[in-house]
Amino acid sequence: MTTRLLNAATGEKRAELATGSISAIAFSPDGRTLATASADRTVRLWDSVTGDERAVFKHQAQVGSIVFSPQGRSIATSADDGTARLWDVATRKERFVLRHRDEVLTLAFSLDGRTLATVSRDGYARLWDVDTGQQRTALRYEGKVFDIAFLPDGRTAVARSINSVWLITLPATEASELAATARARLPVGRAELTEEELDEAPAPAAQPRGRAVP
């Protein structure tokens, strides 16, 4: 099975990629690289102009999500085996394996690219330090979460389930530097969120904070 790259303006075929059956796809922020996940448990990077294959990343299970960091330096992928993986685009090397207890459903980077959010069927949303691979905080949620995204402050992620919107916020001691950086880059005026302590998540050194918004 192949995937065609088309010129958006003319509709003409730019390249044809031997991708196999695709389970996820994403473009880099600059549009120069296309990432595809296939049934063979691989993620491939392609030159979006020439169609040349640049790299192959391997998972141990079916890949369900791909996301580039906003700066284009990192890629995060998630799989059915409860893992998310961070990859370095420049070196084409795996940096970290981030573990849940069940399938990782969705991923999102903060706007500064320093925090990755993962949501799993195990009932937890987790925030990870992209530089170290360490978990920063976690939130136990109810129901099925469909997607997650960060607010511009860089310390709060919003996860949407069927009946609720869940807010997961980095503890102040962890988030102060990130929040200052985000505010300097993207000035946003908004009220502070009220936080409440949740039960401890089954992960090392986690300080779970968050709340559901009906």
Image: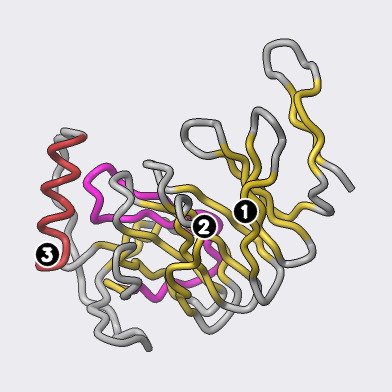
* Mark 1 and mark 2: Cα distance apart in space: 7 Å
Q: Is residue 137 left or right of residue 72?
A: left
Between disc 2 and disc 3, the foreground one is: 2
* Mark 2 and mark 3: Cα distance apart in space: 33 Å
Residue 55's disc number? 1
User: Range of the magenta residues?
Assistant: 138-163
Which of pointers 2 and 3 lies earlier in the amino acid sequence? 2
User: Residue 142 in magenta?
Assistant: yes
Depth check: 138 or 58 in front?
A: 58
Circle 3 sits on which residue? 172
Circle 2 sits on which residue? 92
Pointers 1 and 2 in contact (CB under 8 A)? yes
Depth check: 129 or 190 in front?
A: 129
Q: Is residue 8 left or right of residue 116?
A: right
Which of pointers 1 and 2 lies earlier in the amino acid sequence? 1
Name the image colouring.
Answer: secondary structure
- Residue 114 percent across, percent down from the top left: 29, 55
Between disc 1 and disc 3, the foreground one is: 1
Q: Is residue 152 left or right of residue 44?
A: left
- Residue 44 percent across, percent down from the top left: 66, 53
Q: Quadrant of residue 211?
A: bottom left
